[in-house]
Image (cartoon, helix red, strand yellow):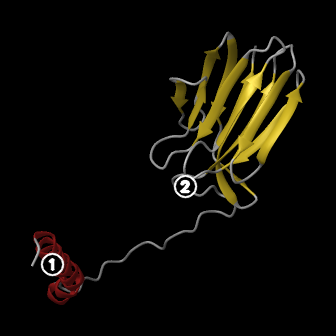
Amino acid sequence: MGRNRKFAMLGSAILGAMMFAGAAAPAMAAEAAPVQTTQHADVQAAPEGAPVKAIALAVATQITNTSNVPVTLDVTGYDMSGHRKVTLRPGQSQQVFGHSYTGHDIEGTMTYPDGTQVPFWLNNPYIGQPIAGFGDGSNWDRYDETERHTRVEAGHSFKVVREADQVWQTMPMKLFTIAIAS
């Protein structure tokens, strides 16, 4: 028998033994455990419409141009709102929704009248708080609910707030607002 085949057979035997022990252990423990009569409080369901707490939820954002110049927003909300390109005049807003299993949930570029471009992204990773970032480097923050930061990229500033989690069309989401300040 070849060496690799011996290791494969040995690995299969160990895996089988572990599976048997894992399946048998609860049954054996159940036989030996004494019966307990503890009373437990009734489990209460969350109120209807309450945000569901889970990891890697979708991300929603409302981007508002609070500057005094028009800004072109070229943005993609993966698997939800899709790609769109709009010019936000001062005071105008755009909502974007996204959820991706492999990358940023929302990403795009803001283009100013002088040609300056500022890439940005929003992401809710599988582990940890949601992230909002600007530029193509390390200009990003993780956000707890209601946390806010002002970020500057390429001479332009942005006020970012992670709002309380929301439910949109029955889907729980991490919600951000971004104000284009300059």
Question: Is 40 displayed left or right of 120 in the figure?
Answer: left
Q: Nearer the viewer, residue 47 or 71?
A: 71
Residue furthest bottom in the image: 31
Q: Quick check: 127 above or below 19?
A: above
Question: Is 67 displayed left or right of 128 in the figure?
Answer: right
Q: Residues within 10 Å of mark 1 (few under 14, many from 20)?
A: few
Under mark 2, the amino acid is: Lys
Q: Position of residue 128 (x, y in %)?
A: 46, 43
Question: Is 110 displayed left or right of 46 in the figure?
Answer: right
**Residue 92 seen by the camera:** no
- Label count reads 2
Q: Quote the CA–CA distance across marks 2 and 1.
A: 43 Å
Q: Position of residue 87 (x, y in %)?
A: 88, 28
Measuring 63% from the left and 16% from the top, which residue is drawn there?
153
Q: Nearer the viewer, residue 80 or 23?
A: 80
Q: Any mark on residue 9, and which? A: 1
Return the disc, 2 or 1, that comes first in the chain's sequence. Answer: 1
Q: Any mark on residue 53, and which? A: 2
Measuring 15% from the left and 69% from the top, which residue is drawn there?
4
Location of residue 170 (image quadrant): bottom right
